[in-house]
Amino acid sequence: MKTYLDLFRGANGRNYAITFALVSTLFFLWGFCNGMIDVLNKHFQNSLSISKFESGFVQFANFIGYFVMAIPSGLLAKRFGYKGGILIGLTLIATGAFWFIPATWIGTFTGFLTGLFILAAGLAVLETIANPYTTVLGPPEMGATRINLAQSCNALGTFFGPWVAGAFVLSSTGEANKSNSTLYIPYLFIAALVVVLIVLFVLSDLPDIRAEEETEVEASGTASVAKPLISRWHFTLAVGAQFFYVAAQVGVWAYFINYLRSPDMPGVPEWLSKALPSGWTFLDPSGIYHVTDLGASRAFGGGILCFLAGRITGSMILRVCSAHLTLAVFGLINTILMLVIIVHVGWLSVTALFLSNFFMSIMYPTIFALGIRGLGDDTKLGSSLIVMAIVGGAIMPLLMGWLADVFSMRMAFGMPLLCFAYVMLYAAFWPQLEKIDSGHVVKD
């Protein structure tokens, strides 16, 4: 068994640990940005007086940017290489972040959505390039482990995003904050961070190892070069799995704060309310403690800590367990947890909501690694299409918001339940799909 010392050693003997560390900062960046939009979902309901369905357009604007830029991102990577593509992506992110200064002055929902779209276009470029890049910075059989480690930085960014955004836009009292006047401040922080990263990447020596990747895949004997990409079932169904996984993750996160602030939720016990920091809860006229918007956003940060713990734990599990089996088990557990949220109202369902973050943690990078396995020359195109599947995060949360408006917040979690079930089935049947694609069909 290879150790962590061999995790970043390429076929040529070169150690790519420093390159991996630099690229991992990009994972932190897009985690931070995506974590912030889940706070904006609730904030715009208050500041712009829009419904839960309408607030779903926050996620729509963000993830439709991924959909639009996925294929162009692959072409940019092919034309300008990894380093050039990353610099283009960072420039787009800086543009979108700076746009929030005039958007705050304009003060319209469309103005804010425009900034999110531009920023997401840049994030799409980074994801299309960075995800497959991490899988080739060392032995190919340890690609799933590397991408999960890098995605741990993504989870860390997702943890800090809601805290920073919530501090500027959410209320610490029972009254909702209806002002957008400070919304540009956290995006100025993003712009400053991106400028620093641009300088670092300009000065860095980022190796372009596309040829090595193709050689490794061909040598492994797993590439099915005779088949067109769409006919490789382990890849095609991975696109679907990524669509539904991102839909589930974005839906759970977008309405996490709404769920904790739902009228169905029981009051916070007095002992817990007094133990929490000031601004997390408030006492209503009937004498019952409830979670404030700011308190719910801080609790969401706790959910992201569960997500981060899952990423770290998952990367260790993947060293000893097969990726598809781990993904199938985690998908089954999350399907059950969503069912608990639907049928039960109370602290058990809140616990299930937090735990779902732990068990969804490895899904995105693991689906990515399983989907591009053995694609050879088609890896770049395949990566673009899997990133394109992130559009699930644009479409399905709108459905979830509609379900919440028409029925209830807890019934809306039926959407992620079905999505996690699909991921579970894809992972369970992945070995059979891979055997068919590689031409080694096992007959009964």
Image (cartoon, rainbow, N blue to C red):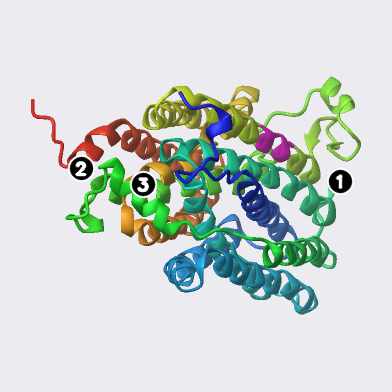
Label 3: state its secondary structure. Answer: helix
Q: Position of residue 275 (x, y in %)?
A: 88, 25
Label 1 amino acid?
A: Ser
Q: Nearer the viewer, residue 201 or 316?
A: 201
Q: CA distance from mark 2 to mark 3?
A: 16 Å
Left or right? Give the position of 19 relative to 145.
Answer: right
Q: Of tags 2 and 3, which is closer to the observer? A: 3
> Which residue is depicted at the point 54% across and 35% down?
7
Point 45% across, 43% down: residue: 11
Task: Answer yes or no: is residue 122 visible.
Answer: yes
Residue under pointer 3? 216
Q: Quadrant of the N terminus?
A: top left
* Residue 60 shows in this picture: no
**Disc 2 versus disc 1: distance between alpha carbons?**
56 Å
Residue identifier under label 2: 438
Whether 358 is drawn above or below 180: the answer is above
Left or right side of 210 for 310: right
N-term-proximal mark, 2 vs 3: 3
Kindly identify the amino acid type of the residue bearing the numbered disc 3: Glu
**Identity of the residue furthest to the left in this view:** 444
Q: Residues within 10 Å of mark 3 (few under 14, many from 20)?
A: many
- The region drawn magenta spans 299-305
Residue 172 is marked as 1
Residue 245 image-quadrant placement: top left
Mainly helix, strand or loop, the magenta region?
A: helix
Q: Contact (CB < 8 A) between labels 2 and 3?
A: no
Q: Are marks 1 and 3 in contact (CB under 8 Å)?
A: no
